[in-house]
Image (cartoon, helix red, strand yellow):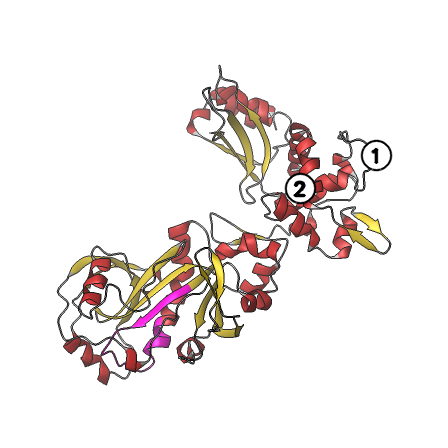
Amino acid sequence: MVHRCRMRPESSRTTSKSRETVEAKGRQEGTGGTAGSVICREYEPGRAAEHRGRRDTAGLAVGLGSPPGTRQRERALAGTHGGSALPGDRGVVGEGLRYVATVDGQWVALLAWASAAWYCAPRDRWLGWTPSLRRPRLPFVANNTRFLILDDVRVPNLASAVLAGNTKRLAADWRRAHRHPVQLAETLVDPARFSGTAYRAADWLPVGLTHGYARRGGRCVHHGQAKVMWVRALVLQARARLVDAFSKPEQSGGGWVTTSKFHGLNWAGPGGLRERLATIEDPRRRRGMRHQWGPIILMACAAVVAGQKNFVEIAEWMQDLPQETLARFGARRVRDNYQAPSELTFRRTLQRANADRIDAVLGEWFASQGLSDAIAVDGKALRGSGHGQPAVHLLSAVLHQEGIVIGQQAVPDKTNEIPGLRTLLTPMDIVDRVVTADAVHAQDDTARFIVEDKQ
């Protein structure tokens, strides 16, 4: 995926001889995420020219481009220049945000952010991403697809000041808009037209040239116009977090949950998960087996804890692990190397496994690892399980901080979640733990069971 350049040289800036007549009043968030009421004034070339003599960026504010009429104003402004869209406005791919920079209420710049490029060799090399690392972490990178300074605006250091103000609030805005954090910002600049001075002044880092490909019509086409990839960390240790195979982003809070607590979990020691999984019967025939049953299930569980979501991701994640980690998980040894199972091996083994038994073993093991002190109990209908009959309703116990399910059971059709909660928590050790549940569980018997019978 190749994104167009954001800024144009002065010779190609838009020129306006007419006054933009669309006005909009609305609420717009100010710099740093503080909400405030802002009047989006008309774009007046004569008034914008007043900024030429300014020697500072006092009065600059970068806010979300969401007030009523913002898009209409952009289209009207583009119409005065003989086009259907302003330069750099190629739309937003995937998740995205738009921003408007103002000086004393007058528009001076427009910015847009979208989902990151699926594959970009210089970025992936700089981060140290493999395909298995890139796939689950790509949503936590945002791409600056548009950066346009409007015509007649001549303010020293304006471009870098706008970028700095935008990146300062981007992570918080992205979390509020899309319910997950963003750790890194990226953009592509055409070196044949621009030097990227504004990005360099705003503390961005060039990491290399692309190969000059663009995605058109569902396939990659070589156009020969290599771009420079620039990146900027939005949070501390963003690069380390994005390359850590044992960590994953927290979907709800915006922090980074290192499931490396992962390294502190008892995977293969006495009483560990490997030992517990060995008690489950292997349903496979012994002929032709290359990998042991317990290590296969153990590796799959570890990959899921690290954020992998399907058989392909599990296999790729295991292939990327160092030899000492594979040895710890009990991988097959061939001469002096440890070999991880293939995707097909994971698929066939897990499809034949007793899922209920593995679920029970995992829940007991997680509960014994001393992770979160709070357990949430909640019931949900399993999507797509109806098919002309009542949908499967599951009642689950989940660790608050890690988001890990430590127990779940189906709720029978002729009853509800209230008696199911006691059945679910009976085998669990909840001493000195907080248990939260929906209001439907505010029952005397349930409270007595939690605070008296289970203590």
Dot 2, how many residues are within 10 Å of its Cα: few (below 14), some (14-19), or many (20+)? some
Left/right of residue 167 with respect to residue 282 in the rendered view = left
**In magenta stretch: residue 328:** no
Going by the numbered disc 1, the residue's amino acid type is Arg
Going by the numbered disc 2, the residue's amino acid type is Cys
**In magenta stretch: residue 156:** yes
SS under mark 1: loop
316 or 307: which is nearer to us? 316
Q: Residue at x 51, y 24 (%)?
A: 392
Instruction: Quickly name the residue at label 2.
Output: 301
CA gap between label 2 and label 1 equals 25 Å
Counting from the top left corner in percent of width and height, residue 190 is at: 43, 75
Q: Earlier in the sequence, mark 2 or mark 1?
A: 1
Q: Residue at x 50, y 58 (%)?
A: 118
Q: Residue furthest right?
A: 335
Instruction: Quickly name the residue at label 1.
Output: 287
The answer to which image quadrant residue 84 occupies is bottom left
State the quadrant of the C terminus.
Answer: top right
